[in-house]
Image (cartoon, rainbow, N blue to C red):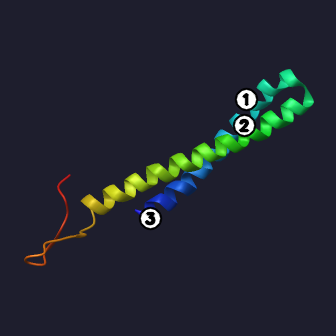
């Protein structure tokens, strides 16, 4: 689950970069109403929020994927009576 979360966070951060670029452009357009300072602040805040949203979303998705792999693919469940390792049914 930890590995899945880490991979998901990296993938989400990469997705967040593209979202940050789009968010920066959208922030600049909205900030254009306030002039040059608004464009700058809108671009920066849009980029930061886009990057954070991508990273958090990727981490959550990766954690869910990792948990699903742990439960249904990797044999981590142990019968306490006979010692047999098994997977949960899908």
| Residue 7, placed above or below residue 16 | below
User: What whole-number distance in Å separates the C-alpha atoms at marks 2 and 1?
Assistant: 7 Å
User: What whole-number distance in Å separates the C-alpha atoms at marks 3 and 2?
Assistant: 29 Å
Image position, residue 41 (x, y; %): 82, 36
Using the image, tell me which numbered label, if any, was put on residue 46. Answer: 2
Q: What residue do we see at 84% from left, 24% from top?
A: 32
Badge 3 crowding class, 10 Å Cα cut-off, few under 14, some 14 to 19, many 20 or more, is few
**Helix, strand or loop for disc 3:** helix
Mark 1 or mark 3, which has the lower sequence index?
3
Residue 27 or residue 11, whichever sits in front: 27
Look at mark 1 in the image and give the residue it sits on: 26
Residue 75: quadrant of the picture: bottom left
Residue 22: quadrant of the picture: top right
Q: Are marks 2 and 1 in contact (CB under 8 Å)?
A: yes
Q: What residue do we see at 47% from left, 50% from top?
A: 60
Badge 2 crowding class, 10 Å Cα cut-off, few under 14, some 14 to 19, many 20 or more, is many
| Residue 87, placed above or below residue 33 | below
Q: Are marks 3 and 2 in contact (CB under 8 Å)?
A: no
Q: Residue furthest top?
A: 33
Image position, residue 48 (x, y; %): 71, 44
Q: Quadrant of the N terminus?
A: bottom left
| Residue 4, placed above or below residue 90 | below
Q: Residue furthest left?
A: 81
Image position, residue 15 (x, y; %): 59, 46
Look at mark 3 in the image and give the residue it sits on: 2
**38 on left or right of 12:** right
**Helix, strand or loop for disc 2:** helix
User: What whole-number distance in Å separates the C-alpha atoms at marks 1 and 3?
Assistant: 34 Å
Q: What residue do we see at 45% from left, 49% from top?
A: 61
């Amino acid at each position: 689950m930890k590995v899945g979360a880490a991979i998901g966070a990296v993938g989400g951060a990469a997705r967040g970069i593209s979202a940050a670029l789009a968010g920066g452009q959208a922030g600049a357009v909205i900030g254009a109403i306030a002039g040059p300072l608004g464009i700058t602040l809108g671009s920066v805040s849009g980029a930061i929020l886009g990057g954070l949203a991508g990273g958090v979303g990727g981490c959550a998705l990766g954690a869910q994927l990792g948990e699903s792999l742990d439960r249904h693919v990797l044999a981590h469940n142990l019968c306490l009576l006979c010692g047999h390792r098994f997977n949960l049914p899908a």
